[in-house]
């Protein structure tokens, strides 16, 4: 069963004709036809009792970016559900639920974090509004993506977001971008992530940090097949906040866990034309969360038609 949603995370209800393509693990197209949606049931797909049962499902609709997922292991007599998101080709970011005022109702804890370090609520609101205007809102979308994803990660104690003391907003050395931000964090975050590395199965693995200037260590989430959080630590930088000798953490979200095995991601990523586009992260993280059966990824913005 393929369920199609739009960029607002609601069932797709626009152009009636959706091209659904199902290819088996041998790269043979077994189904390719137009359907009405938003839910399409495919039956009679052949099974092979080997890697041929790892299917790829792609969806296309006029005026929308292509989407898909792979692999989906099929088995006889087992219904599999694949939730996909179709985003308008010409889209804009809708931050109606993520304004500074709205944050007080929807995410009061997040608003408190974003306000930390500001001289006043107005100063906090002004710097928040400034990144909303930065690069068409992509910098704010990145911040909301990563904080929402960090909140979903259950460490032995708390979540990574619980260890963030203060976001770094205006710093030439540690600038906000559309693919990452920097923050001051309790150094206990490293201890918690190291414990998560030792869990069975592990939630994180340690990865090279050489591509992050000034970093001392880096850990990548391995929970999903795509759109995992990476936490890079700068342990030589210190700042005392609330009596805690904090270090800098640089969170970002990687598209790929295994590039070779997840070719469908290239469809989604290339559709946005950038390897650092938070809108692609939004789609991939939402799909991966649906596949994993966890709480819906909700970064407080949506993608709507321009």
Image (cartoon, rainbow, N blue to C red):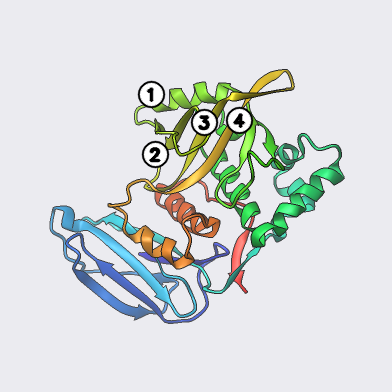
Mark 3 and mark 4: span between their CA atoms? 9 Å
> Which percent across, then down, holds residue 236?
58, 23
Residue shown at the point (59%, 51%) measured from the top left: 142
Residue density around tag 3, few if under 14, some if 14–19, many if 20 or more, within 10 Å: some
Which callout, 2 or 4, points at the residue further toward the start of the chain? Answer: 2
**Residue picked out by circle 3:** 215
Check the image and report above or below for 44 versus 292.
below
Q: Compare marks 3 and 4 and give the one earlier in the sequence.
A: 3
- Is any part of residue 286 visible from this angle? yes
Question: From where the camera sits, is residue 76 visible?
Answer: no
Residue at label 1?
Answer: 198
Q: Is residue 17 above or below residue 269?
A: below
Residue placed under numbered mark 2 in the picture: 222
* Residue that label 4 marks: 248
Q: Position of residue 39 (x, y in %)?
A: 41, 70
The part of the image, by quadrant, that contains residue 91 is bottom right
Tell which tag, 3 or 4, sits nearer the viewer.
3
């Amino acid at each position: 069963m393929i369920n199609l949603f739009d960029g607002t995370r609601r069932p797709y209800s626009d152009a009636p004709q959706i091209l659904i393509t199902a290819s088996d693990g041998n790269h043979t197209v077994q189904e390719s036809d137009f359907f009405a949606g938003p839910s399409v049931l495919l039956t009679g797909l052949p099974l092979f009792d080997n890697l041929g049962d790892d299917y790829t499902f792609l969806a296309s609709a006029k005026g929308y970016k292509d989407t898909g997922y792979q692999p989906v292991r099929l088995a006889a007599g087992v219904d599999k559900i694949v939730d996909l998101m179709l985003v308008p080709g010409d889209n804009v970011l809708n931050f109606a639920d993520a304004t500074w005022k709205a944050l007080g109702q929807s995410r009061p804890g997040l608003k408190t974090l974003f306000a930390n370090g500001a001289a006043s609520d107005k100063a906090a609101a002004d710097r928040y509004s400034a990144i909303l205007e930065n690069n068409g809102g992509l910098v704010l979308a990145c911040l909301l993506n990563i904080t929402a994803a960090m909140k979903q990660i259950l460490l032995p104690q708390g979540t990574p977001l619980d260890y963030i003391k203060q976001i770094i907003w205006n710093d030439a050395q540690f600038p906000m971008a559309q693919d990452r931000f920097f923050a001051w964090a309790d150094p206990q975050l490293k201890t918690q992530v190291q414990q998560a590395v030792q869990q069975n199965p592990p939630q994180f693995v340690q990865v090279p940090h050489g591509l992050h200037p000034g970093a001392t260590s880096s850990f990548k989430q391995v929970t999903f097949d795509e759109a995992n959080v990476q936490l890079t630590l700068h342990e030589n930088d210190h700042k005392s906040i609330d009596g805690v000798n904090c270090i800098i953490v640089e969170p970002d979200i990687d598209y790929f866990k295994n590039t070779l095995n997840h070719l469908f991601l290239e469809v989604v990523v290339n559709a946005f034309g950038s390897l650092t586009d938070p809108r692609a992260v939004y789609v991939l993280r939402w799909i991966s969360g649906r596949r994993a059966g966890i709480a819906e990824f909700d970064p407080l913005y949506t993608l709507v038609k321009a």
